[in-house]
Amino acid sequence: MAMASDRRHSVRSSTPSGMMQPPASNGGSAAAQQESGVQLQLADKLKIFKMDNFDPEAYVQSKCQSQGMLEKEIRSMTSYLQDLKKASAEEMRKSVYANYSSFIRTSREISDLEGELLSIRNLLSSQAALVHALSDFDVDAAHYDHDDSHLIHNDSHDRDHSPLQKWAAEFPDMLSVLLAERRVDEALDALDEADRLAAQANLDQSLTPPEIKFLRDSISLHRQRLADQLAQAACQSSTRGVELRAAASALKRLGDGPRAHSLLLSAHNQRLQFNLHNIHPTSTSYGGAYTTALSQQVFSVISQALSDSLEVFGNESWCTSELVVWATRQTDAFAHLVKRHALASCAAAGGLRAAAECVQIALGHCALLEARGLSLSSVLLKLFRPTVEQALDVNLKRIEESSAALAAADDWLLAYPPGASRASARISAASLGLQPKLSSSAHRFYSMVQDFFEDVGPLLSLQLGGPTMDGLHKVFNSYIDLLISALPNSMEDELNPEGSGNKIVRPAETEAQQLALLANASLLAEDLLPRAAAKLYQAASSAEKRGPTNRMPEQREWKKKLQRSVDRLRDSFCRQHALELIFTEDGESNLSAEMYISLDNVALKEHEWAPSLIFQDLYAKLNTMASIAQDMFVGRERFATLLMMKLIEPVILFISDQSFWEEIEEGPRPLGPCGLQQFYLDMQFVIVFGQQGRFLSRHVHQVILDNIERAVNAFAATGLDPEQHLDGDDVILEICQETISKISGRGRFANGDRDLNSPTASVSAHSMSSV
């Protein structure tokens, strides 16, 4: 230790005297100063949010525009921030409600502690006065003889008492009279005066310590008697209004505020329970009428209790908290009554409109209290939500079952709504074109969805928007399953026999009927259902005074879900027709590598060259469907075009399968010149009619080119030159055009011309180039 001390001393002494060593805390001080500067800078930045004229939307737009954000992104961010603000406020409200009981308990303990401290202070004051009196007492004066003391005693007994002593002696009798006559205000004034005189007497010693003690005991006794008398009066059912507030105010003046507030709330609760006995739900009573009567009683009493509490106790935090807890308890009991006697029966029967009306009535009364700063809607929403969700499920199940029953009798022929057809004589052609053209089951499905939206609209305040839209998507998905089942030889029935076994659906036998299935699904998913949902959210946003774009992301996502359901129907439709082309009824394949390899064993003349029958049938099917779709998908040509593209795709992808090429590239017999020529002709035929009808997507076009290249490479692997055995493009194009004219019955198209009967006649080639 000595060596270490010497070493430290030598280090210090080696420092030049003209240089000052830096303090060890320099780095910490700099960090503290930097942190302080950051805090001041942050405080300066936060000042803008405390300004009275602060505009949140303008602030967000200015910040977003400085970052180069688009108007659409700004609206989306503003919508997100507003939703986040509402969610934050709701979470804060839930947190406050969760901690109210602890706050009330703590407030009461603090109030009791304050009362005990006041009693201790009074006791200490009395003891101090007693000690002071004893310290001033002359002990020597007590050694007088008995005769002298007797004379002094008689003299003091005969001497007149002071006015204060007389008043203190008469005080108990006077206060008893005031209490007997229920002159509360005068009794309170007398008690206050007695407290003042006792304190003054304690200071100037105008009363002896025993007299001060007697006066204080009398004050405490009569104060307790008055408090009990006021509490008894407040508990009587006849005490209301002014009398109740006066009793509570008097108790508060006596220093018993918590008891006064509890008695005030208890009196209102007693009145409420008495009034509720006169409201009896019956089996024939209307749920809305029962809810209205109950709401008027419960929330009027809560409103009156709020007014009385504010008038007597003002904005005391502990009073406000106790009032909120009491009001929450009353609202909870009210919600259970409504749920048991009105909502439960509505939900079980699927009476969504009746349930919505009951909820609206209750929330309407809550809104009146919220305007006064008392929010109780969260209590109702928490209890009503499960029952309303049950009603939602029953209604959605009813729509699903009704749709299944209607699909069993649907002829799958498109028509205008029944009301529009009856009034067609009075409706112009332009306005009639705005009417949806659907089959009977789709019309009924859409009508039921519209009624459902009308009923569920008032319930969006229960935060049921998500479950509602998810449930409706599930119902629409079920309707799509019905449409898939209506396809002849549907593979969905084979893949899911349990799901379709209990659904009897009338089959769509003709191609027009099958396209009507797709017309139903596409019009509902792309136009009718999203439009109805948008109207629903617009009405809800107007009621909540929120921006119209708040729900746009959810609506877009919901529309995508509907579209994916339609894609299932479209894929089933295309897969079925592709399989009909590729395979015979006996399961034999119409499209295989063998059909090309075996051609070199047959002598073919030049004029006999033509596309294979399967591709001629493919074009014939596309031509027929395009003609039907041209009238059926007016205004939705893009959907028809995608449908035709998807119809070509399975056939071309079947050729791309590895098993097809293994036989050509690795089989015992190679692809000969005739097979190569036929394959090249078939692929070019698909390209020609696909481009003319705008049925060919970029992906399928590339697959065709890859297949041609693969066939040419396989032929070249045999040692032969493909260029010597393939006819020129002009010859191939001539053969393709003749085949197209023969099948379609129309004149020939020049290279690159468009089929005017194509469903995409009004869609530009550029718009479909990205497909």
Image (cartoon, grey):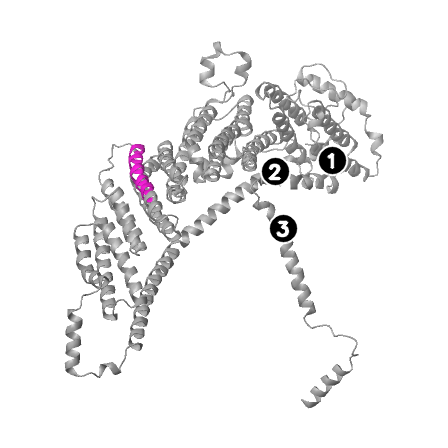
Within the magenta stretch, is there residue 298?
Answer: yes
| Image coordinates for residue 400, horizontal then vertical, percent | 43, 32
**Camera-side residue of 77 and 107:** 107
Q: CA distance from mark 3 to mark 1?
A: 69 Å
**Disc 2 residue type?**
Ala
Q: Secondary structure at mark 2?
A: helix
Q: Residues within 10 Å of mark 3 (few under 14, many from 20)?
A: few
Which numbered circle lies on residue 707?
1
Pointer 2 residue: 58
**Camera-side residue of 365 and 490:** 365
State which quadrant residue 616 falls in.
top right
In the displayed structure image, the side of residue 1 where residue 297 appears, left or right:
left
Q: CA distance from mark 2 to mark 3?
A: 19 Å
Circle 2/circle 3 CB separation < 8 Å = no
Task: Tell me if I can see residue 272 in this picture.
Answer: no
**Camera-side residue of 432 and 188:** 188
State which quadrant residue 200 falls in.
bottom left
**Camera-side residue of 374 and 434:** 374
Which quarter of the rendering shows the N terminus?
bottom right
Which numbered circle lies on residue 44?
3
Which SS type dominates the magenta stretch?
helix
**Disc 1 residue type?**
Asn
Which numbered circle lies on residue 553?
none
Q: Is residue 116 above or below residue 510?
A: below
In the displayed structure image, the side of residue 244 where residue 626 appears, left or right:
right
Q: Residue at x 75, y 31 (%)?
A: 675
Q: Secondary structure at mark 3?
A: helix
Within the magenta stretch, is there residue 67?
Answer: no
Q: Residue at x 32, y 72 (%)?
A: 128
Task: Tell me if I can see residue 559 in this picture.
Answer: yes
